[in-house]
Amino acid sequence: MREFSVPALVEVPDSTNLTDAPFTRAAEQPGTIVIRRRVGEAWTSVTAGEFAAEVTALAKGLVAAGLEPGDRVALMSRTRYEWTLVDYAVWAAGGVSVPIYETSSPEQVKWIISDSGAKAVFAETGEHVAAIAEVRDAVPGLAHVWGIDDGAVGELTASGAEVADAEIDKRRRIASSGDVATLVYTSGTTGRPKGCELTHGNLVLTARNAIQGALAEVTVAGSSTLLFLPLAHVFARLIQVATIEGGIVLGHSDIKRLLPDLDTFKPTFLLAVPRVFEKVYGGAEQKAIAGGKGKIFAAAADTAIAYSQALSAGGPGLGLKLKHKVFDVLVYGKLRAAVGGHVQYAVSGGAALGERLGHFFRGVGITILEGYGLTETTAPITVNRPGALKIGTVGQPIPGVSVRIAEDGEVLAKGVNILRGYWNNEKATGEAVEDGWFHTGDLGELDSDGYLSITGRKKEILVTAAGKNVAPAPLEDRLRACPLISQALVVGDGRKFISALITLDEEALVPWKAQHGKPAAMTVEELRRDEDVIAEIDRAVAEANKSVSHAEAIKKYEILGVDFTEEAGHMTPSLKVRRHVVIKDFAREIDALYS
């Protein structure tokens, strides 16, 4: 059994809660810019004093509407300024916020609202309001549904004008560090979502220890970030809290507006899931190929990777430095400009990032700090640091956290970030947390310096008919490195050999068809039988198989005519594949691989 701990850098009094930072900063530095909010096509600065005043005004409206301390308030919206405003207003009124993904199905919405016992819901669009109306009869405790786009924030602010400032000052001090601040429901990859009780202390301590320890070089004076991941996800949520706690300028965007927003906001660091980086790389590669510059891009990519690898091994030589400088002008500078031109670091989590991709981006000039964590751990357990980077691992524990590898290889975590428990589910809490150690369900390895590597999921280990244990995740990660592949699912539990289901990336296929002389009208259904596509996938499978033994290698695969989507129930909102759903829905295709 191996264990590695990093002492906490920050401790707080028991009375600490999430409203302390914004109100303290408003009192001491009212003119400091804390958020930049997009109004139309322009960014408008929001100062600490202005943000605290807006939070107070909205919190008064919640009090006037009957919100009592401890009441749950759900929030169903994309990432936007009002998300952060509502979150802090709920806390200032003494409530508990409950995020819901904007893409959640009526069944998921019904479950989260009813299980949490939410008294009110903020819903972004008329469509969201209608979705909640469909399930309202099944949740009789739900007293209010407020539409953000319908002007609910302004109406609540006006209705609370008679509530005294002293009432909010009293309300916001009720919660202590051990009290629940939010119920964040798991993505439900293995069953019905569970509500994770994350306390004020979980969020404050995890954020402050990450800022002052793990990400100290990233969150320097003048730093800023543009959030575009869903704030319903714990990863983005922690970064939101970290910006408020650390005085980092925060902006909000979404995938649809991301490129123009990056160009105008110009953040210094980003956070994303690996799929975003995969698509950035794949898109740049396909664009270069389509423009007749495929060989230049390939040489630039190899140089970037070699340069990064050399940085980890004593430094690049003169020849490599010169090549790197040339490609910096031709290729790398354009890639940096595409994300605003000021990004030096990106934090990646949610799934594994390929080692090649990590080296590529560092060679380009954007260091990706890969980390690891779960909803139950308030996001991070470990993260790579700029000054302590080991590409191919998910880094060392953040300050205040210990990591242990159990006898069966499972990763256990203990510290400031561990959830208080699962809402209304003592049985699940008892199974997940033992003597303060949270059982992640992931398998991993710790090296002598405390760097963690994730090797698979404990419950997703495939056992072939010959008794060979195979972790599908590493193979799937390598397959997704191919620009044409959108998703991959490795199968073979109880079978004679390992196989895979593969889906094609429709965006990547557009330039690929032009480059290979294929008709633009060719569909995915036609392309999955195309000899050139099959040749590309064959190469990707062969490359993935290099990482495993012959017994673990993929012997057969099927290219599907459709992609895995959230709408079909195959993906979670945080872009994780729901393995059990895919296996059920594509049972015929899987059986055909073994017939």
Image: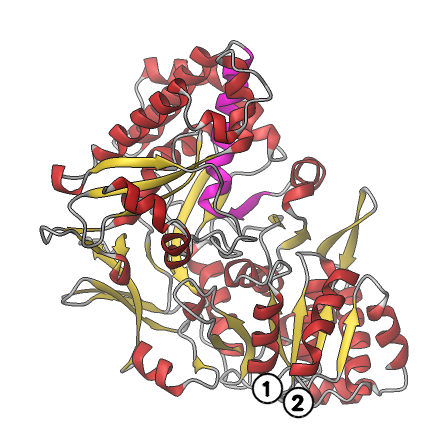
Q: Which image quarter: residue 5?
A: bottom left
**Coloration of the structure image:** secondary structure
Residue at 52 percent across and 38 percent down: it is: 344
Where does residue 174 sit, x and y in percent of width and height? Answer: 63, 89
Write down the residue under mark 1: 175
> Can residue 466 be seen here?
yes
**Magenta stretch, main secondary structure class:** helix
Secondary structure, mark 2, is: loop
Q: CA distance from mark 1 to mark 2?
A: 8 Å
Residue at 62 percent across and 55 percent down: it is: 248
Where does residue 224 sit, x and y in percent of width and height? Answer: 62, 49
The answer to if 354 sits in the magenta stretch is: no
Q: What numbered label is drawn on residue 241?
A: none
Residue at 79 percent across and 62 percent down: it is: 126
Q: Residue furthest front?
A: 595
275 above or below 103? above
Mark 1–mark 2 CB contact (< 8 Å): yes
Which quadrant holds the C terminus? top left
- Identified by mark 1, the residue type is Ala
Residue closest to the eye, 313 or 162: 162
Residue closest to the eye, 345 or 516: 516
Write down the residue under mark 2: 69
> Which residues make up the magenta segment?
268-291
530 above or below 410? above
Viewer-side label of 1, 2: 2
Where does residue 176 sit, x and y in percent of width and height? Answer: 55, 86
Label 2: few (<14), some (14–19) or many (≥20) C-alpha neighbours in 10 Å? some
Residue closest to the eye, 123 or 265: 123
Secondary structure, mark 1, is: loop
The answer to if 289 sits in the magenta stretch is: yes
